Amino acid sequence: MTSETGARPTMGRKDNNTTPYTCLLLATTAATFLTFAGSAQAQSDTAMIARNGPVQNVRMYNIQAQPLASALISFGKQSALQVTAGGELLRGVKTAGVHGQLTPTQALAQLLSGTGLAYVQSGNGTVILTKSAANITLGPVRVGGSVVHQNPTGPGVGYVAINTMAGTKTDTPLTEIPNSIYVITKQQMVDLQAQNVQEALRYTAGIYTEQRGNYSNGCASAGSCGGIVQRGFSTSQFIDGLMSESYSAGETAFLERIEAVNGPASVMYGQTTPGGMINMSLKKPTDTPLHQVSVGFGNWNRYEATFDYSDKITKSGNLRYRVAAMGTTQGTQVNNIDYKRVGILPSITWDIDKKTSLTLLGSYLYTPGMGTNYMQFPVEGTLYRSPYGQIPRSRFVGNKNFNTQETRDEMFEYQFQHRFRAC
């Protein structure tokens, strides 16, 4: 004698001992009255469910997609579990079914997938269905991103520059240029605390800076002072792609980046040395507001201050300005030789349309003291002892009243750009 019972949802019927819209699903498959062994097995399974929750026996499940209420009846028959749920939870809910060799809990979880329902195991061996605490079904997730074009004359991002105007005089990625090009970004100059271009290029491959020492604080041209040797040749300096002897090229406070093009570059830049060329990009108006002020001090009574402001003039932002300024005073290891300089770099950019822009830029530098030292001392009294005593490194052997060198540097630059196609 075999007993199979399958409780069906009690829709609309109300008993004294039954809560309305309550569904009791009970399915057991055991020969309870035929043999003792069968009865013992059923009792053993029930005892394990009561103690440890659902029996974790792997079984074959084959339940097709259908309403959840009828699917739970089939599940109860196949899993020997008692499942209880409120009728209102099952109304109109469908399941995709379950197939395969699974444990009861795995099968039930798959059966409830996408229904917004969850199950809780009670201590008496039953499983109660409840509404999920967070019913969120995510669709396909597509991960993507957009590449922001990097300004080829801008400061770069950290130590990384992607595009450059050096080498080809066009906005070209560095990876597509067959030349050896090194870019010193603004962040690298700040971290190095470079006071001039020579110091910023100290760690660049193929370049030997300060061959005459670091006395040339105010120098711009490598050929005239300071000395920058590139692949064995004294190199030339360019500002925004044009050769210039302006002292603005020597002030890192006015620069966005420094680019070193190793190897012959005369095809694009005219008469240059075989070693290469060095290009500096001056600061220009930015797309986002910029407000920076800095002060510093160092050896030999060095004091400096800089400020850098950039913002839009019009509400639409098609007209922008930028003003950078600096002031420095510093002594040297030699008495009566000082370096003093003040300067300002104003610029304005007008975006005529989406593809056309005009930038006007000018700089003014006043240097009452270049800080250059041309003193030469004899070997005796410096490296070797002298009967007349040692010569200190701070000794000034000239006439301080004639040690004056005052310079004024003025520069104007304009850039007209038009893109014939979208970049």
Image (spheres, helix red, strand yellow):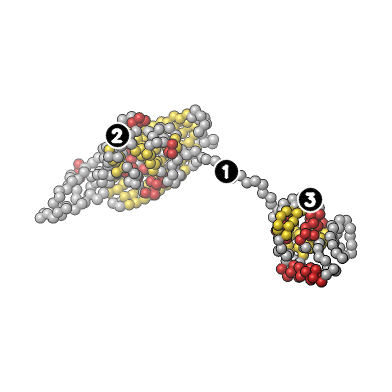
Give above or below for 286 relative to 295: above
Q: Is residue 14 left or right of residue 223?
A: right
Q: Is residue 6 visible?
A: yes
The residue carrying pointer 3 sits among few (fewer than 14), some (14 to 19) or many (20 or more) residues within 10 Å by Cα, namely: some
Mark 3 and mark 2 lie on one chain; the one further toward the N terminus is 3
Label 2: few (<14), some (14–19) or many (≥20) C-alpha neighbours in 10 Å: some
Q: Give the mark count.
A: 3
Q: Which residue is mark 2?
A: 273
Which residue position holds label 1? 144
| Residue 66, numbered circle | 3
Residue 73, by quadrant, is: bottom right
- The answer to which of 350 and 153 lies nearer the viewer is 153
Q: At x 13% / y 55%, what residue is drawn?
A: 385
Q: Secondary structure at mark 2?
A: loop
**Residue 71 point in image, percent of width and height:** 79, 54
> Residue flagged by tag 2: what amino acid is it?
Thr
Query: Is residue 84 visible in this depiction of the protein?
Result: no
Q: Secondary structure at mark 1?
A: loop
Q: Position of residue 328 (x, y in %)?
A: 33, 45
User: Who's the residue at 83% across and 59% down the image?
Assistant: 23
- Identify which residue is drawn at 81% across, 54% down: 70
Where residue 187 is drawn, which disc sits there? none
Residue 37: which quarter of the image?
bottom right
